[in-house]
Image: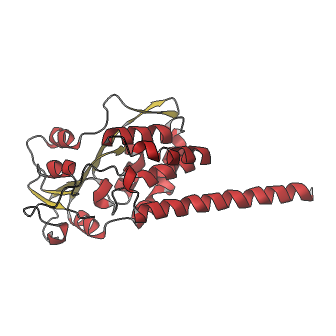
């Protein structure tokens, strides 16, 4: 009897040590960066005619509509890989998280779209929908809040309407953007499911193209304010807005 209790306590101890290690690793990756799995396109030197978000006036924006991405804009780093690793560990297993980590050497040779598709497949293939809902509600918001860009957040709360466009899977960001940042709408990548499980594949609509998604959403009515990162993709995306700013990360 004593031996069984000792074995159980040992298992409990090592399991929680592994959990703590995974969380610490995720925090290190989030705060220090993880360049070779950067999801951004090639960085663009900030053009002189595009003002920094530091110059954005917060007064009188209560009736305005803002558009932006959570990735590289609301979050202070370019790197979304650590959040995928958290989902892989919490929703799947240590083995799934380890497999995702081992995919890094392959990811560094892939294009932007293929990096994201590989990470989505490894992270979500066979994952239960209810497990992902729990992670999105309990685990991810804590890490998002720790990495929130304060100035971008100040601009965000100064406007009356907030619409987010992102290629990141909806299930990873929707809860946080709506419940914590009072987002009015989110246009994000949808994942394919079968029954109560994710297949690891993207829906037939594919990855969200922010440029075309923005035009489809607003039509001829241009949004008042846009915030983007210094990457080329975001430069085109926010140029559709009446006024836009760049977040330098």
> In the figure, is residue 92 to the left or right of 219?
right
Residue shown at the point (51%, 53%) measured from the top left: 86
Q: Where is residue 89 in the image (x, y as percent from the top left)?
A: 56, 49
Rendered position, 189 above or below 28: above
Residue 151 place in picture, x, y as percent: 26, 69
| Quarter of the rendering occupied by the N terminus | bottom right
Give the quadrant of residue 5.
Answer: bottom right
In the drawing, does residue 105 fall left or right of residue 43?
right
- Image: 173 above or below 52: above
**Does the image show residue 183?**
no
Q: Nearer the viewer, residue 70 or 35?
A: 35
**200 displayed left or right of 156:** right
Position of the C terminus by quadrant: bottom left
Residue at figure coordinates x 38%, y 43% from the top left? 169
Q: x, y percentage for residue 141?
A: 44, 59
Where 210 sits versus 6, above or below?
Answer: above
Residue 118 coordinates in the image, percent (x, y): 42, 38
Q: Image point 16% across, 67% down: which residue?
A: 52
Q: In this view, does 60 lie to the left or right of 113?
A: left
Residue 114 occupies quadrant = top left
How many marks are shown on the rendered structure? Answer: 0
């Amino acid at each position: 009897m004593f031996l069984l209790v000792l074995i159980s306590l040992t298992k409990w101890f090592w399991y929680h040590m592994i959990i703590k290690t995974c969380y610490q690793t995720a925090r290190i990756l989030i705060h220090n960066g993880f360049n070779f799995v950067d999801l951004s396109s090639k960085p663009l030197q900030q053009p002189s005619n595009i003002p920094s978000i530091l110059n954005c006036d917060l007064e009188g924006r209560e009736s305005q509509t803002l558009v932006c991405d959570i990735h590289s804009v609301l979050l202070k780093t370019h790197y979304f890989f650590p959040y995928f690793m958290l989902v892989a560990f919490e929703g799947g297993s240590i083995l799934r998280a380890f497999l995702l980590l081992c995919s890094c050497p392959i990811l560094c040779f892939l294009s932007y779209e293929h990096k994201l598709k590989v990470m989505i497949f490894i992270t979500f293939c066979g994952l239960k929908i209810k497990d992902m809902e729990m992670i999105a509600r309990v685990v991810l918001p804590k890490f998002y809040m720790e990495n929130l860009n304060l100035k971008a957040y100040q601009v965000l709360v100064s406007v009356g309407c907030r619409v987010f466009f992102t290629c990141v899977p909806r299930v990873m960001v929707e809860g946080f953007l709506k419940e914590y940042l009072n987002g009015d709408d989110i246009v994000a990548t949808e994942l394919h499911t079968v029954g109560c499980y994710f297949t690891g594949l993207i829906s037939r609509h594919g990855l969200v193209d922010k440029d075309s998604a923005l035009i489809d959403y607003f039509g001829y009515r241009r949004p008042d304010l846009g915030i983007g990162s210094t990457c080329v993709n975001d430069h085109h995306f926010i140029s559709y807005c009446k006024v836009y700013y760049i977040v330098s990360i």
